[in-house]
Image: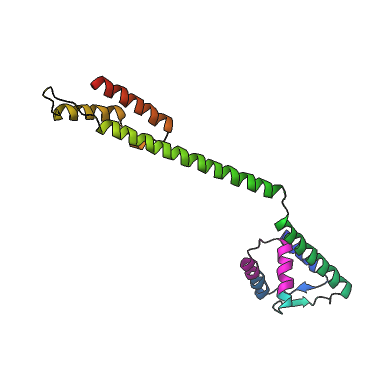
Amino acid sequence: MPSPVAVEVEKRLAPAVVADAQSNVDQVVLYLQKKGLDFTADNVVEAVWALHGEGRILWAVDPVAVSPAEAARRKRAEDAARMAAEDAKFKPGLRHVNDLAADNTRIADKGKNDVEAKALAQTKSEITREITSYVKGHHSGNVNYAATESGQAKLQEVAGNYLQLTNLADAKRVLQHVRSVKQQLS
């Protein structure tokens, strides 16, 4: 039993009949693959006529020559389709408006993300500065290195793995907490 596509192709090609030859099948399949077309009746008929024009199809019953009126009708239909495709490229339709809106949203989000990324980086730098700037003085006026290292370790523990933060609000909370603990240590 022939496939529905084959039945439809036979109807459209009638009264002509394509010869039942493997070379015809191979030619049509190759044509569809090269053009990136699906296996539909429309595409197979297009392939058969294109290959017939190149003399690469074998016929069981040769196609009837197309009348001048039919040839003119086909040419007008092809021209109209080509013109419609050209016009569609330049008409700002709904798709065009939606594409522009999506592009504008994407650009705005990127700008917002860039600003937030800069603020996040700046906040992380401030946390690092708060930790490394902690210095504990000795009663003699010199730096107490042991107390300084201990205090910086405590601040580092409070900050946790702050360099891995990806949220600006979280980074700001860590910065506030580091500042409050630093003040308590002083």
Give the prevailing secondary structure in the magenta stretch: helix
Q: Can residue 11 be seen at all in this image of the molecule?
A: no
User: Residue 110 in the image: x percent, y percent?
Assistant: 51, 43
Q: Can you tell which quarter of the image residue 144 is in?
A: top left
Is residue 59 among the parts visible in the rendering? Answer: yes
Q: Is residue 91 above or below residue 122?
A: below
Of residue 62 and residue 120, the one placed in the foreground of this image is 120
Whole-percent x, y for residue 70 in the image: 86, 71
**Residue at (60% x, 44% y) in the render:** 104
Residue that appears at 61% across and 45% down: 102
Left or right: residue 67 compared with residue 119: right
Task: Residue 170 in the image: state x and y as whole percent.
Answer: 40, 29
Picture quadrant where residue 15 is located: bottom right
Q: How many marks?
A: 0
Question: Could you tell me which quadrant the C terminus lies in?
Answer: top left
> What residue lies at 71% left-to-right and 64% top-to-bottom?
43
Q: Which residues are magenta?
A: 29-50
| Residue 15 within the magenta-colored segment of the rendering | no
Residue lying furthest right:
69
Colour theme: rainbow
User: In the image, residue 18 lies at what x, y percent?
Assistant: 75, 73
Quarter the N terminus occupies: bottom right
In the image, is residue 159 above or below residue 121?
above
Res 160 → quadrant: top left
The residue sitting at the front extreme is 141
Tell which residue pokes out farthest to the left in this image.
140
